[in-house]
């Protein structure tokens, strides 16, 4: 039996060793670096870098080199006499070509466009990190509040159980009526029901937090630093929203995308301009009569004698392109209009979010100050009531109500403190 107990307890010990404790800072660090959406945004930035390199490469010439071998059987040109004869001839050719777009305005415009896209992706990456951080912060404190409420209910239940035992002893000696025990047990049933609901809510909020972090295993306990204290935020500057807006990555990203849409219009218009291409070609060959007695000219002599070079220039002037250039320009203009509208939406959402944080922070600050006073009053009331209850001057139900009021005040103070820290953390995300 002892061996079985040791065997069964081993997985439990192993699981406990694997559980990690994450505070808010570590949680945010993971969310803003390891989340799949962040990783996708990082890949997008790397892709934009490669697009910049590729667009610069379009200014360089393309060079190819090759060789070919062919055989001719029957009536063909004798490479020695340059006369048509019935021969079998082997021919080896060598060539090299260099193509160069000497002028194509679209290539220069694409470099500028891709650089802007790269900058926009950088801002988008920061915006994605901020969005994830904002969501994680709210879910983190929701979990802390649900966990605190469960702890309060557990404290209440433990106190009620002790109160029942004490009251039952006093009933036995005749100091209290039997109805006191019934009243306390009736309220205990209500508390137990609340405790089950609170436990379920805590698990739901933790699962939501893990989901926001894209973590599937429940091996993390999210804890709040005891050193976290509500700090004072100043909103005295009337231009604080404008200043924060101008450095917000989501706002900067949409501004850059407007520039991108403007640049794309120029890129499409470059299709109306002519292009100039250059070509350089070099070639030579070596021929040999197969199966005959004719002496072949040495390879090195033929290689040098048969050299050929060509330089070629081509000017293309677009005259009519099935309305494709015109249509592409109009589509780019529509994209610019859409980017302007997107800017209005982004500004509206950011301003609303910043104002909401200010309103909720000021409200939380005032509420926290009032609840601190209420907590002290409730604690003094509980201490006095506990003395009266022990002396038999207060019935069990009244003491139960006073005790619950004090514990409720304790939870309200914790929740208000968390709300204040929550608004501060949200503000810091927007302010970084």
Image (cartoon, grey):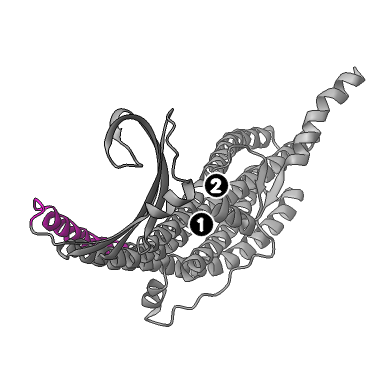
Magenta stretch holds residue 117: no
Percent position of residue 351, x then y: 34, 67
- Check disc 1 and report the residue beneath it: 133
Percent position of residue 362, x then y: 46, 70
Q: Quadrant of residue 62?
A: bottom left
Percent position of residue 264, x then y: 25, 62
Percent position of residue 190, x then y: 57, 35
Q: Residue at x 45, y 60 (%)?
A: 49
Bounds of the magenta span?
320-347
417 sits left or right of 99 in the view: right
- Marks 2 and 1, how far apart at CA: 10 Å
Q: Secondary structure at mark 2?
A: loop
Q: Main secondary structure of the magenta part?
A: helix
320 sits left or right of 314 in the view: left
Among all residues in the image, which is located at the extreme right? 2
Q: Which mark is residue 213?
A: 2
């Amino acid at each position: 039996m002892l061996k079985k107990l040791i065997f069964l307890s081993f997985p439990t010990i192993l699981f406990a060793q694997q559980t990690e404790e994450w505070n808010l800072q570590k949680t945010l660090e993971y969310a803003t670096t390891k989340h799949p959406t962040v990783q996708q945004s990082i890949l997008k930035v790397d892709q934009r870098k490669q697009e910049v390199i590729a667009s610069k490469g379009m200014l360089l010439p393309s060079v190819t080199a090759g060789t070919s071998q062919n055989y001719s059987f029957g009536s063909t040109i004798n490479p020695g006499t340059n006369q048509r004869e019935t021969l079998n001839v082997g021919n080896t050719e060598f060539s090299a070509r260099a193509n160069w777009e000497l002028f194509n305005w679209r290539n220069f415009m694409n470099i500028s466009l891709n650089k802007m896209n790269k900058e926009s992706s950088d801002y988008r990456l920061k915006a994605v990190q901020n969005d994830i951080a904002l969501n994680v912060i709210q879910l983190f404190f929701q979990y802390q509040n649900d966990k605190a409420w469960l702890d309060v209910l557990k404290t209440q239940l433990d106190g009620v159980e002790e109160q029942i035992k004490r009251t039952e002893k006093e009933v036995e000696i005749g100091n209290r009526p039997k109805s006191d025990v019934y009243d306390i047990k009736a309220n205990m049933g209500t508390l137990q029901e609340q405790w089950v609901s609170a436990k379920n809510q805590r698990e739901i909020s933790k699962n939501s937090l893990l989901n926001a972090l894209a973590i599937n295993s429940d091996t993390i306990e999210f804890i709040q630093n005891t050193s976290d204290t509500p700090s004072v935020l100043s909103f005295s500057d009337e231009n604080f929203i404008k200043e924060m807006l101008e450095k917000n990555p989501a706002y900067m990203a949409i501004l850059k995308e407007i520039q991108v849409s403007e640049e794309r219009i120029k890129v499409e218009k470059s299709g109306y301009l002519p292009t100039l291409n250059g070509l350089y070609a070099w070639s030579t060959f070596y021929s040999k009569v197969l199966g005959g007695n004719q002496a072949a000219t040495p390879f090195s002599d033929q290689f040098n004698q048969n050299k050929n070079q060509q330089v070629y220039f081509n000017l293309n002037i677009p005259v009519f392109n099935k309305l494709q250039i015109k249509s592409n320009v109009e589509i780019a203009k529509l994209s610019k209009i859409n980017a302007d509208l997107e800017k209005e939406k982004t500004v509206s959402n950011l301003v609303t979010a910043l104002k909401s944080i200010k309103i909720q922070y000021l409200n939380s600050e005032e509420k926290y100050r009032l609840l601190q006073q209420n907590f002290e009053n409730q604690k003094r009331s509980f201490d006095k009531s506990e003395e009266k209850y022990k002396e038999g001057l207060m019935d069990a139900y009244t003491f139960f109500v006073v005790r619950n009021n004090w514990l409720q005040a304790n939870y309200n103070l914790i929740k208000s403190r968390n709300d204040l820290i929550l608004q501060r953390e949200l503000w810091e995300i927007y302010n970084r």
